[in-house]
Image (tube, rainbow, N blue to C red):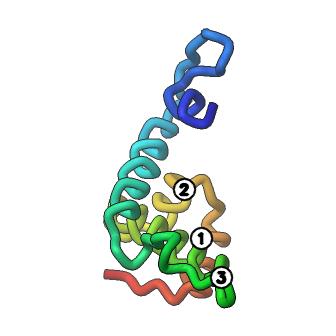
Amino acid sequence: MATAAMNGNTGNGKARKAKPGYASRIDLIRSTIRSLLNEPDLRTDTTEIDPSDGLNFYERVARYEAHLIESALERTGGRQNQAARLLGLRNSTLSWKIKRLAIRAK
């Protein structure tokens, strides 16, 4: 279902046109997911998880979120307002996340 939605299929056999700007967001998300899947620091083999310790879910989510924001900033040449639009966030939300996650401009 999620794949169908990303491809513009509503699940009822009817394809819908993507709204302007959504195609670039979807491309960004796809490319980021692909790069995350290939990044050794973000991959966790289930054999690496110690059942007594587990893993820190929120730390993993924060690392993914930081990588997604960095990718958007890189794609927009460091322009926060365009990166926020690309990610579907308000400028203030993106600014807060950049500070919270200590993301530095490149």
Secondary structure under badge 2?
helix
Residue at 61% in and 86% down: 100
Judging depth in this view, the residue of 23 and 38 nearest the camera is: 38
Which residue is rendered at x = 42% and y = 62% of the image? 72
Which comes sooner in the sequence, label 3 or label 1?
3
Give the quarter of the figure containing the N terminus. top right
Residue in the foreground of this view, choosing between 67 and 44: 44
Badges 1 and 2: C-beta atoms under 8 Å apart? yes
Q: Which residue is mark 2?
A: 87
Which picture quadrant has residue 57? bottom right
In the depicted structure, whether residue 52 falls above or below residue 65: below
Q: As displayed, is residue 79 above or below residue 16? A: below
| Cα–Cα span, label 3 and label 1 | 35 Å
- What's the mark number on residue 94? 1
Labels 1 and 2: the sequence-earlier one: 2
Q: Residue 27, percent across and down? A: 40, 44
Mark 1 to mark 2: distance in Å? 9 Å
Q: Position of residue 49 (x, y in %)?
A: 56, 80
Where's the C terminus, which quadrant?
bottom left
SS state under label 3: loop
Q: Residue under circle 3?
A: 51
Sequence-first disc among 3 and 2 = 3
Q: Residue at position x 66%, y 72% from top? A: 92
Of badges 3 and 2, nearer the viewer stands 3
